[in-house]
Image (tube, rainbow, N blue to C red):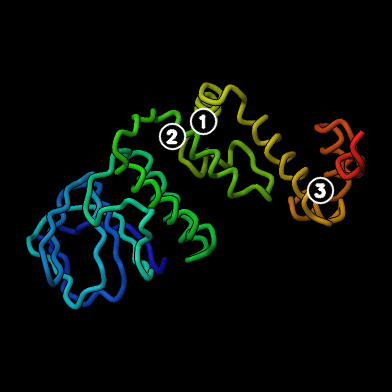
Amino acid sequence: MLWFGEFISPQKDWKHLTRRLFEYEMMIVTEGELYIADEDREYHVSAGEYLIMSPTRIQHGTRVSRCRFYWMHFRCEALPASLSLPPHAAFRDRENIVTLAHMLLRSEAEQPRGMRSRYLATLLLTELARGQEQGEKPISPQIRLSEAIKSFVAFHRFSEIRVVDIARELGYHEKYLSAVFHGTEGITLKRYLTLCRLGEAKRLLLETDYTVSEVAYYLNFPSPHNFSRFFKKEAGVTATQFRSQKNGPPS
């Protein structure tokens, strides 16, 4: 990914500028109509549709309009064949797409083209591709939100995450977020965060040679003592005992 942003036409007689496009550009239209063309054909992109344009000598607007869209410039040798993503199509889950785009905007404002932005850009493309799959059963907004929560937690698995942090990032009240997650997953969000952190600690203890202090460091605990106390409370044994039990000979 090179750049990402949101465009809102300043007046009703706006028309896309004429330029050479050196990389791929994706436009996700959320309001109005976008009239744009390349060397070969013209496109009419309505709200609820996206367009991916390949590099071209001439990209230009064909008609004036008022519109609003997210845009992303990116480079790639070719879109992978496994990604079923037509150049121009409608997207089904507008709320989820807009949420991901908003998260990407915030990420770019904080750390342009960082690892988190690249992750979110890939997730956005994947979600657009998912919407093209034939025969896919509709997914409720609640399940989509829970999946977004789990994706956020997985990405920040090395940090201490609070419910309020997720709520702020996704743009929901923390009580609503917790209620939706509990209703779809059958576990409280707070407990899920604890279990995910415990699971990552166990994985590091089993799959790496990190010391207990190093595991505490990688998981961003305030101190090794704080981590040891957390692990003993949740696992029932110390981190050292857990590692020795799992690495010992079978009984």
Q: Is mark 2 on a helix, strand or loop?
A: helix
Query: For the residue labelled by badge 3, is the local secondary structure a helix, a strand or a loop?
Result: helix
Q: Is mark 1 on a helix, strand or loop?
A: helix
Q: Which sits in the foreground, 6 or 136? A: 136
Residue at the image point whose x is 80% and y is 47% from the top: 206
Q: How far across and how far down the image is residue 199, in percent?
A: 72, 40
**Amino acid residing under circle 1:** Leu
Q: How far apart are marks 3 and 2 (CA)?
A: 32 Å
- In the picture of the structure, the residue carrying the numbered disc 2 is 144
Residue 200 lies, in percent from the top left, at: 72, 44
User: Residue type at mark 2?
Assistant: Arg
Q: Tell me which label, 3 or 1, sits earlier in the chain.
A: 1
Q: Name the residue under label 3.
A: 205
Identity of the residue drawn at 86% across and 41% down: 246
Q: Give the numbered dot on residue 177.
A: 1
Residue 163, numbered label: none
Residue 234 rendering spot, x and y as whole percentages: 80, 32
Q: Of callouts 3 and 2, which one flags the residue occurring earlier in the amino acid sequence?
A: 2
Image position of 73 with respect to 169: above or below: below
Q: In this view, does 165 lie to the left or right of 54?
A: right
- For the point 86% across and 51% down, which residue is it? 212
